[in-house]
Structure formats: C-alpha cells, structure tokens
Amino acid sequence: MDYAVQLLVSFVATACFGIIFNVPLNRVIYCGVVGAMGWLVYYECTLREIDPVQASFLGAFAVAIAAHALARKYKTPMIVFNVSGIIPLVPGGIAYNAMRSAVENDYLMSLQYGSKAFMISGAIAMGLVFAEVLMQLVFRALRAMRYKKIT
C-alpha cells in the first residue's frame, strides 16, 4: 500500500510540475512516469538504509536513463523529461531547514543541513551526468557495430 501511495503522489507532483514548465500536454504523462520511477528508486534505496546522497544519485541516474529513452522514442528534447523528473528528488525541505536554522542563530545545525542539501544536489547533478555519458557510450558502440555491419 505504501508503494502505491508513493507512486501516485510522486506521479501527480511530477506531472503538475511538467504542466508548470509548459511541457507539451501529450508528454505530461511521461514526465509523471519518469518522476515517479526516479522517486521509487530513491524510496527503495532509503528503505534499504542507503544514504540519502547515494539514493539521490541512483534516483537521478534512473530519471536520466528513462528521460533519454523517452526523448529518443518521442523525438522530444531530453530536458523536458529531466527537469520535471528530478523535482521529487530536490532537497527543498533540507534547504528550508538550513535557512530556518540560520535565522534562528543555530549556525551549527544550519551548516549541517546546508552541507547535506549541497551534497544531495551534487549527487543529483552527477547522476544526470553519469547517465548521459553512459548513454553516449552505448549509442557510440551501437553506431560502430552498425557501421561495421554495413561495410
């Protein structure tokens, strides 16, 4: 039951952000699927007690792989799926707590929250970049195999 709720809420949130970002309406459902898939990867990792930074990396990696596949299939720029897909992974609550702690003069706690938000944000960026590099290597190898088959 918990997975169903997580899936539904992450799908709706991601699809709504897709609408806010002016994604074409026929692609909003796919944006929701990408975001829900990334969130479920993150959620499963946290249930298995994997660090949130590593879980964010894996979630962003899954988002980027799915975005790349959908972008090729539907001939749509990959960023359409990437931007809305990573929304559930963004550490907004942690960043808010960092700012709140700073305003309350609890600088040590603010530094802890801020560094955690920074690491999670970096992990999301690294997940997107690593997936892009992996997909480029795969497609380069496929092109080379196809070229060898032709000649």
Image (tube, rainbow, N blue to C red):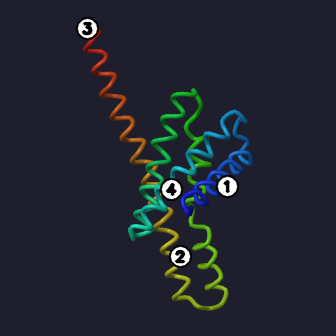
Q: Earlier in the sequence, mark 1 or mark 3?
A: 1
State the SS at label 2. Answer: helix
Q: Earlier in the sequence, mark 3 or mark 4?
A: 4
Q: Residue tagged by mark 4?
A: 40
Say whether marks 4 and 1 touch (CB < 8 Å): no
Q: Amino acid at mark 3?
A: Thr
Separation of disc 3 and disc 4 at Cα? 44 Å
Q: Amino acid at mark 4?
A: Leu
State the SS at label 4. Answer: helix
The label nearer to you, 4 versus 1, is 4
Q: Is residue 47 above or below residue 68?
A: below
Q: Who is closer to the viewer here, 4 or 98?
A: 4
Which residue is depicted at the point 51% across and 82% down?
Answer: 111
Q: Residue tagged by mark 2?
A: 114
Q: Residue tagged by mark 3?
A: 151
Which residue is depicted at the point 40% across and 63% down?
Answer: 54
Q: Earlier in the sequence, mark 1 or mark 2?
A: 1
Q: Amino acid at mark 2?
A: Gly
Task: Please identify the quadrant where the N terminus is shown.
Answer: bottom right
Q: Would residue 105 appear left or right of 113 to someone viewing this image? A: right
Separation of disc 1 and disc 3 at Cα? 49 Å
Which residue is depicted at the point 43% across and 58% down?
Answer: 57
The label nearer to you, 3 versus 4, is 4
Where residue 138 sits: x, y (%)?
34, 33
Q: Would residue 149 appear left or right of 99 to someone viewing this image? A: left
Q: Residue tagged by mark 1?
A: 13
Separation of disc 4 and disc 2 at Cα? 25 Å
Q: Who is closer to the viewer here, 109 or 87?
A: 87
